[in-house]
Image (spheres, grey):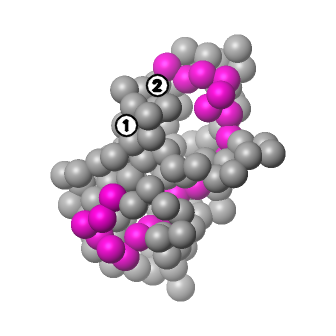
Amino acid sequence: QVQLVESGGGSGQAGGSLRLSCAASGLRFGAYAMGWFRQAPRKEREFVATISWGGKSTKYADSVKGRFTISRDNDKNTVYLQMNSLKPEDTAVYYCAADKTGWSLDTDAAKYDYWGQGTQVTVSS
């Protein structure tokens, strides 16, 4: 059974930092591309960042480029999202997801095969 478990969410102030983690089990983690998405209240789920199976390629949404960094540790079956220079508009539930097309940098949520339950991030001004 595949499980993706996010952690590290919480509250922060504008300009601050948070680091999200997503621990994976039940899948050959190193073969999957991993992504982060978020969903704010009354908005659709949106792409944040993705990283290829080996970690050499990444892609970011324009809204987080230069502020967020996605990384992975295949030995620990974990993907991370370092969030710096937080803004109130970053407030959302953040989800990690696994894409069996490991080389692809999909920004479309429909392309992802497995999802975590999400972790809340709240940024105050």
On screen, residue 73 above or below 116: above
Query: Circle 2 sits on which residue?
Result: 84
In depth, the one of 14 and 78 nearer the eye is 14
Q: Is residue 81 visible?
A: no
What is the magenta range? 85-105
Position of 74 with respect to 115 (left or right) is: left
Position of 31 with respect to 98 (left or right) is: left
Residue 112 part of the magenta-drawn span: no
Q: Is residue 95 visible?
A: yes
Which amino acid, by three-letter code, is at mark 2? Asn
Q: At 80% from the left edge and 45% from the top edge, which residue is drawn?
A: 42
In depth, the one of 34 and 44 nearer the eye is 44
Query: Circle 1 sits on which residue?
Result: 69
Q: At 60% from the left edge and 22% from the top edge, which residue is drawn?
A: 87
Q: At 39% from the left edge and 31% from the top edge, which residue is drawn?
A: 65
Position of 84 with respect to 88 (left or right) is: left
Quadrant where the C terminus lies?
top right
Task: Answer with the quarter of the image where residue 52 lies.
Answer: bottom left
In depth, the one of 89 and 7 nearer the eye is 89
Q: At 30% from the left edge and 65% from the top edge, which residue is drawn?
A: 104
Binning the other alpha carbons within 10 Å of mark 2 as few (below 14), some (14 to 19) or many (20 upward) gives some
Tell me if label 2 and label 1 are in contact, CB under 8 Å. yes
User: Which label sits on residue 97?
Assistant: none
Residue 88 part of the magenta-drawn span: yes
Task: Answer with the quarter of the image where residue 31 lies.
Answer: bottom left
Q: How many numbered marks appear?
A: 2
* Residue 6, horizontal then vertical, whole percent: 56, 55
On screen, residue 105 above or below 58: below
- Residue furthest bottom as drawn: 1
